[in-house]
Image (cartoon, grey):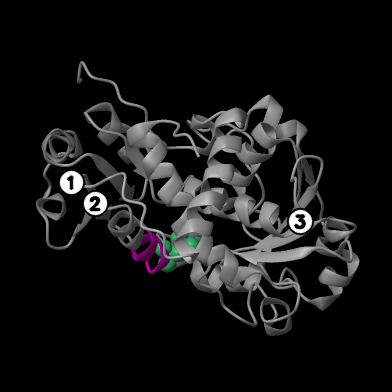
Amino acid sequence: MNPIQPRHYLQFRDLSRDEYQYLFRRSALIKKRFKQYQVHQPLVDRTLAMIFEKHSTRTRLSFEAGMHQLGGAAIYINTRDSQLGRGEPIEDAAQVFSRMVDLVMIRTFGQDIVERFAAHSRVPVINGLTNEFHPCQVLADVFTYIEHRGEIAGKVVAWIGDANNMLYTWLQAAAILGFRVHFSGPAGYGVDLQRPGYAVSEAEQQCLRCFDDPLQACEGVHLVTTDVWTSMGYEAENAQRLRAFQGFMVDQRMMRAADPRALFMHCLPAHRGEEVQAEVIDGAQSVVWDEAENRLHVQKALMEFMLLGRLPD
Ligand code: CP
Ligand code: NVA
């Protein structure tokens, strides 16, 4: 174990409501200045290592471009061509990475892997998706909601489909930021309140309401969101999942049941005709491209915060 214990971002609950409020304000400022071509390079000479044990388009692009824009450098490492793929212990890797770089982002399988890495790291570690959580994505999603509709506290988000890493992260966000989540998914793929090691807290349970009927789950809600039926790492279950999730595609009926100003989000990549109807993801209520773009801006604010703390405007 390291004597130096930096702060990490491994789950959404690792930051407080007050820190999120700062980050959302900061993200808006960073985005605005970037759009005006104002150079903002507080991380000159700093390096981010990005470790990928699963595929990625958005996460790699946004962290790599973001670090470059902040004046630093990003190094891409994957399991296939690093020693991680040949069995080097994650604890040893953490020691080595954190003596050479200033920040580490990891996308991997079990949450225990990022936790073990963080426990042996001298520098902050960011979860870039695990089987259990995807905090950077929900950070971008909440920011996107606020950008379009203002305050999220008091609102209702409908999650239709698989109770996966995104759903559990939305639940943490709901408890911290004060909104509610309606969940609807097929039997056998519902919310596991006692997930081994990562039980849903009392406060999170208070924010959750489960529905058998997805149409009912969408009634009057302010945001409808979904994700793939088969997450990375679960590919062997794909055929079985395709059958089980029939009837849970987000469609225009569900969007009509929602509040007239409801938004649609999907963290992407999406499968039109499976978890979402093309008319919904490509329709007027969909903000999926803003959501993807905002990964860049919120993660710039997050990296800056983790390395430099709060900065004045
Ligand atoms: N939404 C998301 O994390 O996308 P990637 O898998 O492409 O990184
Ligand atoms: N739930 C999906 C999200 C992909 C960004 C997965 O884990 O594969």
221 lies above or below 44: below
Instruction: Give amino acid for label 2.
Output: Gly
- Badge 3: how crowded within 10 Å, few (<14), some, or many (20+)? few
Which stretch did the figure color magenta? 55-62
Query: Which residue type does callout 3 highlight?
Result: Arg
Q: Which residue matches tag 3?
A: 149
N-terminal label among 2 and 3 = 2
Counting from the top left corner in percent of width and height, residue 193 is at: 64, 36
Q: Which of 210 and 307 is in front in this view?
A: 307
- In terms of sequence position, does the residue under pointer 1 or pointer 2 come before the other? 1
Query: 173 left or right of 7?
Result: right
Label 2 residue SS = loop
- Mark 1 vs mark 3: which is more N-terminal? 1
Secondary structure mostly seen in magenta is helix
Q: Which residue is drawn at 56% across and 67% down?
A: 228
The residue under the point 31% across, 54% down is: 67
Name the residue beneath numbered marker 2.
72
Does residue 187 show up magenta in the picture? no
Q: Is mark 3 on a helix, strand or loop?
A: helix
In screen coordinates, is 195 left or right of 209?
A: left
